[in-house]
Image: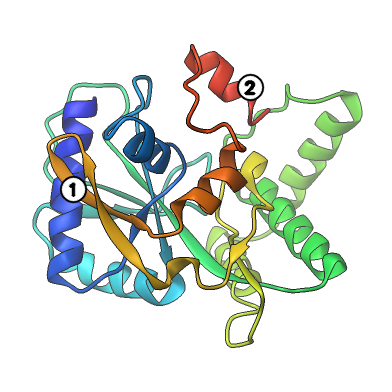
Amino acid sequence: MQKKLLLLLKNFHEFCVKNDIRYSLDWGSLLGAIRHQGFIPWDDDLDIMVDRENYMKLKKSIGNNAELSFDITSPSAFWIPRVRLAHDDCELNYPPTIDVLIMDNAPDGALARFLRVSVIKLLQGMLKTKPHFRHGNCVARIIARVIHWIGLLFGRERKRKWYCWISQKSNGKVTREITSYNEEYSCLGKYYPNDLMNEMILVPFEDMEAYVVKDYHRCLVTQFGDDYMTPIKTRDNHMEMFK
């Protein structure tokens, strides 16, 4: 899988450089780049972040690339755009994938932030076509079912338009911080300085170089804590962070 992912990242990096698209590795991919100069040993996908302007440029340009394809059809997370190899003969159960996380302005007020994330979580529940109803206590499972049933009343494209609109609601305003509203449910509510995406640097990643935000330390502390440079033993321990 990681050999395929590296090929995917090389194609994606070349595509972004050619089309003047600014991106940074994110989450486990960023951590792997800084701590391992490549993949975390158990990682099986890639994460990148782009601001809204570069996301729109990526979405528009990728259709003209013969090596890459753009996918927004995942039944479990329609809100996460994904980039894959256009012609992949991989026989693995899950194709090599780059998750594209979009950075938007976050409102400054605590109440506005809470309401924004709450609406996003509601829309995620409404968008899922294969939700899991076994997580949480009895009340949480009932709420998840009700939200899913409400979501069935609306078409997928309408729900995605609502999601896109609420995510960009603070764009065009001057705000202190930015965030990604198309994260997985358990990763929502992470905030970063508004200049995070202003400057990128190249760092080693396996046998290539990839872009990361210059202030990667603050980004990784926000995501993983102050001890992010201390390796953990197993993937299961890693996943405990997000439960």
Horizontal side of 59 relative to 100 (left or right) equals: left
Give me the residue at 43% from left, 36% from top: 28
Q: Nearer the viewer, mark 1 or mark 2?
A: 1
In this rendering, position of residue 159 left or right of residue 65: right
- Element type at mark 2: helix
Q: Quick check: 70 above or below 169? A: above
Q: Is residue 152 visible?
A: no
Q: Nearer the viewer, residue 58 or 74?
A: 58
Label located before the other in sequence (1 or 2): 1
In space, the residues marked 1 and 2 are separated at their CA atoms by 30 Å
Is 32 situated left or right of 14 in this image?
A: right
- Report x, y in % for residue 23: 33, 61
Residue 176 pos. (x, y %): 66, 75
Outermost residue to the right: 139
The amino acid pointed to by label 1 is Glu
Give the image location of residue 72, x and y in percent. Answer: 40, 53
Quadrant (top left/top right/bottom left/bottom right) for the N terminus: top left
- For residue 209, the mark is 1
Q: Is residue 33 visible?
A: yes
Secondary-structure class at tag 1: strand
